[in-house]
Amino acid sequence: MHDAINNKPVDSPEPRGLGRRHFINSAALAGLALGAAACAEKKGEAAAPAAASGATPAAGDHGANATHLKPGELDTYYGLWSGGHTGDMRVLGLPSGRELLRIPCFVPDALVGWGITNESKAIMGTRPDGSLRYTVADTHHTHASYKDGDYDGRYAWINDKINSRIARIRLDHFVCDKITQLPNVQGFHGIFPDKRDPVDPAINYTTRVFCGSEFGIPLPNTATEDHTQYRSMFSCVDAETMEVRWQVLLDGNCDLAATSYDGKLAATNQYNTENGARFEDMMSAERDACLFFNIARIEAAIKDGSFKTIGKSKVPVVDGTRAANKDPRTALTAYVSVPKNPHGVNASPDQKYFICAGKLSPTASVIELAKVLDWFDGKLEKIDDAVAAEVEIGLGPLHTAFDGRGNAYTTLFLDSQVVKWNVEKAIAFHKGDKNAKYVVDRIDVHYQPGHLNASQSETVNADGKWLAVGCKFSKDRYLPVGPLHAENEQIIDISGEKMVLKADHPVRGEPHDFIIFKRELLKPKQTYALDDFPNAIKDPKESGVFRQGRKVTVKVTSQAPTFSLREIKVKKGDEVTLILTNLDKIEDLTHGFAIPNYNVNFIVNPLETKSVTFIADEVGVFWCYCTHFCHALHLEMRSRLIVEA
Ligand code: RUQ
Ligand code: CUA
Ligand code: CA
């Protein structure tokens, strides 16, 4: 026996409260419910052979290392994935790789009405005429807030490279609640939250998010053609207010970012220390840098007033250039030399190292954080002595993940491989022990991997169970669907000595970075509370059409299968603000609200309130209807907008 709506066995436990399934069963017409159940069973049958013929699931693949979950089984990890140029965040269950949600951030979304409702537009940003300022984005990196070196389930952040915006996601509701545009930077790429305060030991959680910018621009921005005058900056955003706290002017550029577990250091890799404007120039030098920031000193300098501001921005900018930071005892920044055009920089879970991947060099550089701090204290003569190892690992190394057992896993873009290597053995080899075999294993991936990450990788609780790899090309791995190929994400079991490829997942381009963490770390709420919204309509009796001159406020509530107003009468030319509160409090009982010809469609989840504003410029009858299947009488759930001449 299967549930009509959820297609899961009806004897599976309900998480809490009265589920939508019970609601449907008690309220729906029996005949309709049976019809839907038949559909669901058919789908189940169709899915079964596909799963059985899937990539490489071994026979009886239902143990601890299974990626194929049985119907009704829950994943053990959450994954937060960057959506790429769809401008959203993807939420996956791991190890199955099933996509659970897309959280719209920077780009409108027709399911939830992101970019349609007044509340989402206020977060996204509008022009004076009320239209959205931006409708394109390019997300790359996503990271979540920390406490005591592990995720605390409060927030996640994601970048938009095109318009240099950072979005915050509340992990209780899985919604974007704030977006900030960074001033005076372009190509905002790397992002990483700090893990504790560098000075105050009581602040053992994230309060800052660091943002690197790839593209130098004239400061302030003018039509200057001489690129030698272009500059990049490293920005710090306040995790709570989402305001930009400060920026650091620097030499070269910023790409990805990493932060230390003690809160004292942040770093960014620099592939364009040449400050070149053409790609030949950007790869002309044999070595570039990994640039370190001394957070406590930067904030002390700002307190002392040693900063300037640029253009209209009021954000304090400190000087992090090489020339201004020669004396280690006062330096705000330190430029560690690494080979040609490095890419990812990642913090090892033992808290000791940042690993900078070589990209154009077949090497990984292991930078020892204690030594970087020694240099800032005047105890290390040359900053480059902080490099504990610079070892060959393969062609095109990009990003590194960790298993918590001393091993690093780095994607090799050109080799189409992941290489597993032991960090301490690499250090021994670098020191001269030529018998130290630091490469442990290699595995082919399909094809050209970019990001990878392991379960709990960049936390003190790295558990070395699963590794996901984002492959930029899928080539022959899936049925052809025209010129645009799916990308290929692969799941690798890293619990043993050898890596084992377990599954392929097609994914719409282009997802980039992600994190994977234990499901116990999140406590999402499955309904809203009426008080979450200042404009909530708490009682259907408050519904109505309220006129103030040409401005009309329509207050409506939804309770399956009806809206509180059957007719909504307005006059042509009115500015109509429609507020809808969903008074259904049952989990999963979402309603939609669409108005034909008015470009309105959005959903309201249990006890959620949303509003839209539009000019009633077309006379006639418009059937507002529920777009989200909620009830046996879902199709009947309508009301009429009547716009009179
Ligand atoms: S970068 S493939 Cu946009 Cu994350 Cu390395
Ligand atoms: Cu309400 Cu469908
Ligand atoms: Ca370079």
Image (cartoon, rainbow, N blue to C red):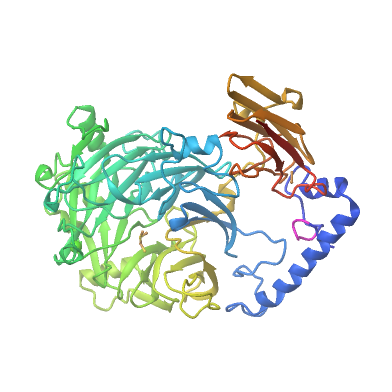
Residue 240 seen anywhere in this rendered image of the structure: yes
Would you identify the image quadrant in which residue 222 lies? top left
The part of the image, by quadrant, that contains residue 201 is top left
Q: Is 129 part of what is drawn in magenta?
A: no
Q: Is residue 306 above or below residue 248?
A: above
Determine the image quadrant of residue 331.
Answer: top left
Q: Position of residue 629 (x, y in %)?
A: 74, 50
**Residue visible at 58% across and 24% down?**
551
Vertical placement of residue 396 versus 146, above or below: below
x and y, in percent, of residue 497 in the image: 46, 74
In the foreground, 165 or 144? 165
| Direction from residue 557 to residue 220 in the image, left or right | left
Specify whether 363 is left or right of 62: left
Q: Is residue 585 visible?
A: no
Residue 641 in picture, x, y percent from top left: 70, 35
Indicate whether 169 appears above or below 442. Answer: above
Q: Which residue is at the front of the view, 134 or 488?
A: 134
The quadrant of the picture showing ligand 3 is bottom left
Characterize the magenta stretch by its predominant secondary structure. Answer: loop
Q: Is residue 334 above or below residue 282?
A: above
The residue lying furthest to the top in this view is: 548
Q: Give, as a single range, the part of the protein colored magenta.
A: 5-9
Q: Is residue 6 magenta?
A: yes
Most extreme residue toward the right is 30
